[in-house]
């Protein structure tokens, strides 16, 4: 499965890592819902680290849609909320 | 559904919505390609802008370093002349500069990281745009307008997502450099006004240098006077025009004339 870390590009991650990554993902979501900045920072970096460790980078000249998307490592809670907002606009 | 999955779907939907759709799907491919090339130009300009900001901050760090070294020297001079108060003042200002420098160095590191990220993004986008162009030409050559329709979505997979991602990355870099440029502008003004010479805010301008200068002028005058009183002539020889003591400054010039008049034998020192 293809995962995009925003600002970093795409990685291919094996299905076997999905359960673990979903756990990390749930922690981020919980922190975003609670508006807990400290928990958000730790859980987001844990998730991104987890994806980086489990994945292999997709070649630059490969054109594939991602199955999963992660915000960039310094993203704020607000930026993540925007990414989850279906009415938002992407610049460019 | 996981947050990562939801984000992916929403992001892709938004990115696809941003596509310009033409009547002939083959034209849609061309339009999109144009926009990709524009985005590539934009991201390259972004890299250049970040590099410019980084160099500006580097220049400021160097300027502050020069200033800081000068204050260290002044503190040493002040100590040599038994002026601990002045030395303390110089070191206080230096510590103010040091914290400014640490702040600027952190900015420099951030801009450097940003520059690297954008450079990679630009390389990635370039490879993808090139791959898209090949795909587009194949579709245009192989299919009629009606047939091409079914190939369009396939052709766009990956590229619109990449465009959205790069677009946001450029936006973030712009925001960051704008913030830093505002701060860099403020520091440039401070450097130009000389206020950083005076981090303690006690006086204006480089008063430590002035005081040290006047002290060394005074001590030159005193030592010459002492030499005259002692009736020693060798000191006169050093007061030929162009042979002033480097630290004496303009205040010592009138003093230099005195021995010549009193002794009525200007050549005496050299004889």
Image (cartoon, coloured by chain):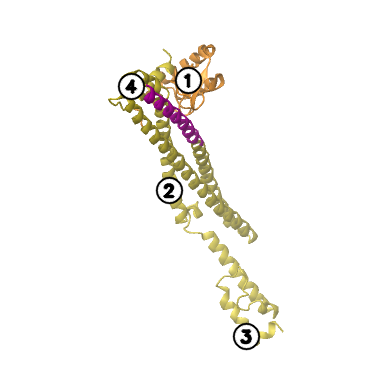
Chain colours: A orange, B yellow
Mark 2 to mark 3: distance in Å? 57 Å
Does B102 sit left or right of B226 as displayed? left
* Near-viewer residue (A80 or B199): A80
Mark 2 to mark 4: distance in Å? 57 Å
Please state the horizontal and vertical placement of residue B101, each as a whole percent of the image.
53, 45
Q: Are the two marked residues, 4 and 3, in contact with CB atoms closer than 8 angstroms?
A: no
First of labels 4, 3 by sequence position: 4
- To which chain does the residue with label 2 belong? B
Mark 1 surroundings within 10 Å by alpha-carbon count, few (fewer than 14), some (14 through 19), many (20 or more): many
Labels 4 and 3 within one chain: yes
Image disc number at residue A3: 1
Highlighted magenta segment, given as a residue range: B116-142
Residue ID for mark 4:
B144
Mark 2 surroundings within 10 Å by alpha-carbon count, few (fewer than 14), some (14 through 19), many (20 or more): few
* Near-viewer residue (B78 or A68): A68
Residue extending farthest to the right is: B271
Q: Is residue B121 magenta?
A: yes
Residue ID for mark 2:
B185
User: Nearer the viewer's eye, disc 4 or disc 1?
Assistant: 4
Mark 4 to mark 1: distance in Å? 34 Å
Q: Is residue B246 magenta?
A: no
Does residue B256 sit above or below A41 in this rendering?
A: below
Residue ID for mark 3:
B262
Give me the residue at 56% from left, 50% from top. Answer: B65
Give me the residue at 51% from left, 55% from top. Answer: B197
Label 1's element? strand
Label 4's element? loop
- To which chain does the residue with label 1 belong? A
Residue extending farthest to the left is: B23
């Amino acid at each position: 499965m293809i995962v995009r870390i925003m600002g970093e590009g795409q990685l291919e991650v094996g299905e076997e890592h999905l359960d673990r990554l979903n756990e990390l993902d749930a922690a981020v979501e919980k922190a975003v819902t609670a508006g807990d900045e400290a928990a958000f920072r730790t859980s987001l970096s844990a998730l991104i680290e987890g994806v980086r460790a489990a994945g292999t980078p997709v070649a630059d000249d490969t054109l594939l849609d991602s199955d999963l998307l992660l915000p960039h490592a310094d993203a704020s809670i607000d930026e993540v909320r925007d990414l989850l907002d279906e009415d938002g606009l992407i610049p460019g | 559904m996981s947050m990562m999955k939801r984000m992916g779907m929403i992001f892709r939907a938004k990115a696809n919505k941003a596509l310009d759709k033409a009547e002939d799907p083959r034209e849609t491919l061309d339009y999109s390609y144009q926009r990709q090339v524009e985005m590539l130009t934009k991201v390259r300009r972004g890299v250049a802008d970040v590099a410019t900001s980084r160099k500006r901050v580097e220049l400021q760090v160097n300027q502050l370093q020069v200033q800081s070294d000068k204050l260290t020297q002044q503190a040493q001079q002040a100590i040599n002349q038994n002026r601990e108060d002045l030395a303390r003042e110089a070191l206080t200002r230096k510590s103010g500069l040091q914290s400014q420098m640490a702040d600027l160095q952190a900015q420099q590191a951030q801009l450097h990281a940003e520059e690297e990220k954008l450079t990679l993004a630009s390389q990635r986008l370039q490879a993808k745009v090139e791959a898209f162009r090949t795909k587009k030409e194949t579709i245009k050559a192989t299919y009629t307008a009606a047939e091409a329709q079914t190939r369009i979505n396939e052709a766009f997979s990956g590229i619109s997502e990449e465009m959205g991602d790069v677009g946001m990355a450029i936006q973030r870099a712009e925001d960051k450099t704008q913030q830093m440029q505002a701060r860099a502008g403020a520091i440039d003004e401070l450097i130009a006004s000389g206020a950083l010479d005076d981090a303690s805010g006690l006086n204006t301008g480089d008063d430590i240098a002035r005081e040290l200068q006047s002290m060394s002028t005074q001590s030159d005058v005193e030592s010459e006077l002492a030499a005259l009183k002692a009736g020693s002539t060798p000191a006169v020889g050093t007061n030929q025009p162009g042979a002033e003591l480097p630290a004496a400054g303009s205040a010592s010039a009138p003093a230099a004339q005195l021995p010549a008049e009193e002794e009525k034998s200007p050549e005496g020192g050299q004889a």
